[in-house]
């Protein structure tokens, strides 16, 4: 049983990992067929993985409603929204348009989901302005450099800034293409080396957190 | 010529969209029931939409229909049943919620994680590391000549001077993050150079983030302005009044309750 | 002076919210219309599409959801208008599940205004899970990755996909991305092996992080944020929502710059005072 619970998953990870590292360098049709097939399988398995996250959400709010904790009415609203959308979606076979017109599912998407999701993220603009006013101070040389760079880019990337102070456009282009590129490149190289190291640790069975814990890991 | 009347579902949709938008923005005053209601509706509707689309795409389009077709055409051939393997692995993944058989999910995760790690390693090395280093150490002097003025052309990102600055930036930032060596002497100068490069990049990132968030706000305001028109029966204006009055009413009730609690 | 500075530093943040709201609302109601300067990275995308022969295959991946709609939808509309004007065959798809309806809406809208036909001039494949696995699957066999399109029409035999077996048959690709599952993923798992040319359209938040790819030629162009969309609209000589939004963008930026400068002025006035803001 220990073999099935511990050794087998680690062996599968190792075989799959090494196999697909080698596959990249082997242009043989068998190798190409393998990646064609397995990548298709991954699409299907990823779809199942979606339901993992969704099931967890169902459970958390179901418990809140059952125990009638403070604020359980909002969890009920969540369920109403979820079930209503699912009913409309399955009724319309997952289609947002039918016979040249919008379905109920499409209506829900356009007039509830799109504005809700858009507004949730747009509200950050207010907070970014408020935070900039309260905290964006030239306390040190480094902070001053950051401040000047931010102001130049904010001016250089809008027509009014380009019109009033034309050199901010050219300086912004230079900042982005040279200085910013250098930093992002360095971070990219460093992070990628870390990612490759982590992937190797996973393949070799040194890193096992993806197995989900438990004393037989 | 009078404007064509909008269909009733469009007008209703505009009222719902404007209302939900204003309820979310009411958070700018204070966390309140209107915001909480909209926030929970947002999560619920997103989840519902995801479930419907995932079902139709994953189960029907990628699994059920191809399986039905292949088994229908060649029921005796083992190749027709090959898609049952990812289906089984997907089901194994869902056993994570059943403690007695949750170990089955490890097999599915091993498969996915092994594949993901295996395909990522050579591609990451090629795209993120080798290609980036290659571009950093390109020749400093332009191959086609052009002389000193071409070398010193700051406006051209590929000019000699910019390539030198880029090289200095990459090396100094990489060195700054290398904590295994003490940053003293020449090392300290390199690390400090790296810090200044980082500050400039973070400033640029801040500027772009501000631009991005403001753009999102512009998008929502555009919709609110559109829905404030006569064609939509002044949805935004009416709902703005409703939201403000609701918040005032709620504030009065809360203050009264707090006052009573204090007296007790 | 110090008392004034102290009061201003502690001002209710809702005043700042109102200032930002006014800075955006007023220019939208009364635009002033300044010229838009085009950057080389946006022009590179335009020039490449402009040079493509008719009926070339153009893949447009809508890797965003409604939260990034104001920035990326104008880019999508401008690119589609350009592609349809050049009579290219357009393949659309998305990696972001909640962005599917949005993407289909954009296709329907632009196709209707340009008289293009689904199945003949364009196809919207919809969403499929997998991310990098999906790209690899498309790179190996497009019809296995997407057996049918968003309207459930089988993809095999579609006139718009004639001669297209996988990503190697794509002439140009643009990923409109709002995050991780986007441009970088398309390069690493797509262009690196399947060798199609590609560019990126992104939100302002992730745009600075994509410049190393632009520098190294891994992407041939980059359309960054609403400004990038406005630049593209200028190039195709068809103003849209991006251009209309730039006045408000300018005003809001200036308000924030003034706020930041003021905050520093007050900070320097109060610096060194006991209990002053640090």
Image (tube, coloured by chain):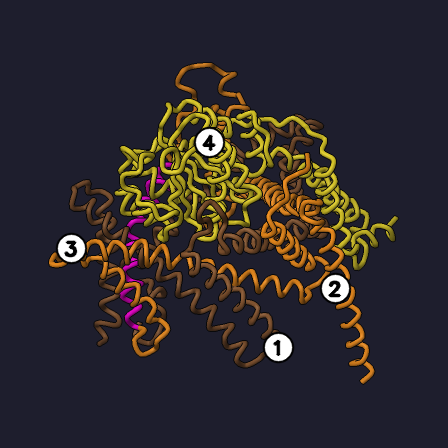
Helix, strand or loop for disc 1: loop
> What is the drawing colour of chain C?
yellow
Q: Nearer the viewer, mark 4 or mark 2?
A: 4
Q: Which chain appears orange? A: B
Range drawn in magenta: B103-132
Give how far apart the Cα atoms at labels 4 and 3 are: 43 Å
- Is label 4 on the same chain as label 1? no
Give how far apart the Cα atoms at labels 4 and 1 are: 55 Å
Q: Is residue B182 visible?
A: yes
Q: Callout 2 environment at 10 Å: few (<14), some (14 to 19), or many (20+)? A: some
- Is label 1 on the same chain as label 3? no
- Residue sitting at x 23%, y 51%: A37
Where in the figure is residue B176, as x and y percent of width and height?
A: 50, 46
Where in the figure is residue C197, as x and y percent of width and height?
A: 37, 32
For label 3, the residue is: B79
Q: Callout 4 environment at 10 Å: few (<14), some (14 to 19), or many (20+)? A: few
Furthest residue in direction left, as rendered: B76
Membership of B53 in magenta stretch: no
For label 2, the residue is: B246
> What is the drawing colour of chain A?
brown
Give how far apart the Cα atoms at labels 4 and 2 are: 47 Å
Helix, strand or loop for disc 4: loop
Q: Main secondary structure of the magenta part?
A: helix
Quarter of the image for the N terminus of chain B: give it: top right
For label 1, the residue is: A70
* Residue C115: image tag: 4
Q: Which circle's residue, 2 or 3, is located before the other in the chain?
A: 3
Helix, strand or loop for disc 2: helix
- Is there a contact, CB below 8 Å, between mark 2 and mark 3? no
């Amino acid at each position: 049983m220990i073999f099935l619970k511990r050794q087998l998953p680690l062996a599968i990870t190792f075989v799959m990992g090494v196999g697909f590292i080698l596959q990249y360098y082997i242009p043989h049709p068998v190798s190409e067929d393998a990646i064609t097939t397995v990548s298709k399988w991954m699409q299907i398995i990823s779809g199942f993985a979606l339901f993992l996250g969704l099931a967890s959400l169902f459970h958390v709010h179901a418990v809140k409603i059952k125990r009638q904790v403070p604020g359980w009415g909002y969890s009920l609203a969540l369920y109403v929204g979820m079930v209503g959308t699912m009913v409309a979606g399955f009724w319309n076979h997952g289609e947002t348009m039918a016979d040249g017109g919008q379905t109920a599912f499409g209506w829900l998407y356009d007039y509830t989901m799109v504005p809700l999701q858009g507004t949730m993220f747009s509200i950050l603009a207010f907070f970014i302005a408020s935070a900039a006013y309260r905290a964006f101070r030239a306390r040190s040389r480094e902070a001053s450099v950051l401040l000047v760079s931010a102001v130049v880019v904010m001016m250089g990337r809008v027509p009014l800034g380009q019109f009033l102070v034309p050199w901010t456009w050219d300086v912004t282009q230079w900042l982005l293409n040279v200085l910013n590129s250098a930093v992002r490149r360095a971070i990219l190289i460093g992070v990628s080396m870390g990612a490759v190291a982590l992937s190797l640790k996973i393949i070799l069975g040194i890193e096992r957190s993806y197995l989900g814990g438990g004393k037989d890991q | 010529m009078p404007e064509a009347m909008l269909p009733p579902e469009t007008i209703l949709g505009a009222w719902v969209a404007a209302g939900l938008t204003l309820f979310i923005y009411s958070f700018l005053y204070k966390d309140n029931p209107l915001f909480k209601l909209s926030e929970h509706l947002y999560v619920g509707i997103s989840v519902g939409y995801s479930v419907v689309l995932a079902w139709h795409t994953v189960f029907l389009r990628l699994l059920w229909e191809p399986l039905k077709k292949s088994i229908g055409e060649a029921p005796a051939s083992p190749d027709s049943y090959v898609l049952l393997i990812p289906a089984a692995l997907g089901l194994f993944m869902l056993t994570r919620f059943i403690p007695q058989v949750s170990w089955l999910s490890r097999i599915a995760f091993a498969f996915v994680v092994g594949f993901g790690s295996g395909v990522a390693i050579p591609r990451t090395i090629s795209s993120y590391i080798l290609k980036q280093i290659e571009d950093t150490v390109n020749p400093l002097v332009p191959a086609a000549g052009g002389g000193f003025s071409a070398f010193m052309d700051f406006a051209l990102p590929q000019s000699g001077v910019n390539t030198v600055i880029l090289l200095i930036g990459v090396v100094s930032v990489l060195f700054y993050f290398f904590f295994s060596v003490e940053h003293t002497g020449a090392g300290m100068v390199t690390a400090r150079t790296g810090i200044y490069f980082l500050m400039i990049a973070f400033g640029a990132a801040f500027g772009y983030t501000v631009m991005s968030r403001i753009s999102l706000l512009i998008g929502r305001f555009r919709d609110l302005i559109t829905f404030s028109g006569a064609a939509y029966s002044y949805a935004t204006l009416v709902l703005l009044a409703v939201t403000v009055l609701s918040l005032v009413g709620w504030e009065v009730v809360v203050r009264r309750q707090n006052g009573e609690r204090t007296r007790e | 002076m110090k008392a004034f500075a102290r009061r201003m530093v502690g001002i209710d943040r809702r005043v700042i919210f109102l200032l930002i709201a006014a800075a955006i609302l007023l220019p939208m109601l009364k635009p002033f219309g300044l010229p838009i300067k085009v950057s080389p990275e946006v022009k590179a995308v335009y020039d490449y599409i402009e040079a493509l022969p008719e009926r070339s295959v153009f893949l447009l991946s809508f890797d965003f959801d409604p939260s990034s709609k104001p920035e990326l939808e104008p880019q999508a509309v401008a690119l589609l208008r350009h592609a349809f004007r050049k009579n290219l065959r357009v393949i659309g798809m998305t990696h972001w599940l909640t962005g599917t309806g949005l993407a289909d809406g954009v296709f329907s809208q632009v196709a209707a205004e340009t008289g293009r036909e689904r199945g003949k001039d364009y196809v919207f494949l919809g969403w499929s899970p997998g991310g990098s696995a999906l790209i690899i699957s498309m790179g190996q066999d497009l019809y296995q990755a997407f057996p049918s399109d968003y309207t459930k029409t089988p993809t095999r035999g579609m006139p718009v996909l004639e001669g297209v077996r996988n990503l190697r048959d794509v002439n140009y690709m643009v990923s409109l991305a709002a995050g991780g599952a986007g441009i970088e993923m398309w390069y690493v798992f797509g262009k690196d092996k399947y060798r199609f040319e590609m560019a990126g359209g992104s939100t302002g938040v992730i745009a600075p992080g994509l410049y190393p790819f632009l520098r190294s030629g891994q992407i041939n162009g980059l359309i960054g944020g609403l400004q990038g969309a406005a630049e593209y609209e200028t190039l195709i000589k068809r103003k849209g929502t991006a251009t209309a939004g730039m006045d408000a963008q300018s005003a809001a930026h200036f308000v924030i710059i003034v706020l930041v400068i003021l905050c520093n002025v007050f900070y320097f006035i109060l610096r060194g005072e006991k209990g002053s803001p640090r």
